[in-house]
Amino acid sequence: MVSPISCLSILVIPLLFTSLFYQVSNACVNATYRDRICKQSNYYDLCTSTFAADNRTSTADLTGLLLISISSNMKLLQTTIVNRIPNILKLLDDPLDKARLQNCQTDFFHALGKLSGAYVASASKNYQEVIYWIRDGADKAIDCEDIYIEGAPYM
């Protein structure tokens, strides 16, 4: 399973930098160009399947692809917050595990809010603001992963 933070880096960041360093036009992005974007990610198959699954992709320009990738990550975070984490919490007995996972749920909730800001900024083509929101959202999601990587007690 791919974590929400991995999806942030998989989809949003390559599109974001592509949008910033190339002239953004209203022209549709063809399949070859989308493929080049996905090859920049660590999870090529996930990137291509995400765009293939969204009916907006065929008519999307770079900003449209950025919106698709952000909304995809928002859906993943929403599913994680509302469905996955509560179901896992029901199975846990260890108070430390529960506390860590509840902290992750809070971190992901805050990351979702940051991605909402990125979506609005992207829709208005304010790419500097998108960078701010994406970085802040990624930091929130990374906070969850750090709890497990550091292995330090949390409570």
Image: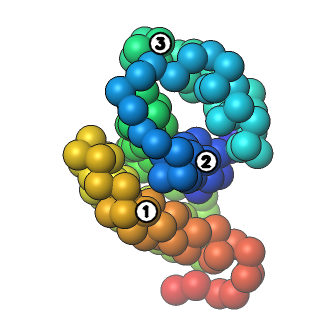
The residue at which mark 1 appears reads as 131
Q: Residue at x 62, y 16 (%)?
A: 31
Classed neighbour count for the residue bearing mark 1: other residues with Cα under 10 Å, few (<14), some (14–19), many (≥20): some
The quarter of the picture where residue 144 lies is: bottom right
- Residue located 37% across and 63% down the image: 128
The vertical placement of 91 against 107, above or below, is: above
Residue visible at 69% across and 72% down in the picture = 148
Q: Label for residue 69?
A: none
- Whether residue 137 is visible: no
Residue 52 vs residue 85, the one in the foreground: 52
Q: Say what amino acid the circle numbered 3 marks.
A: Ser
Please tell me which of labels 1 and 2 falls first in the chain.
2
**Label 1 close to label 2 by CB (< 8 Å):** no
* Residue at image mark 2: 14
Type of residue at label 2? Pro
> Which one is in front, 87 or 58?
58
Residue positioned most to the front: 23
For residue 58, which numbered disc appears in the image?
Answer: 3
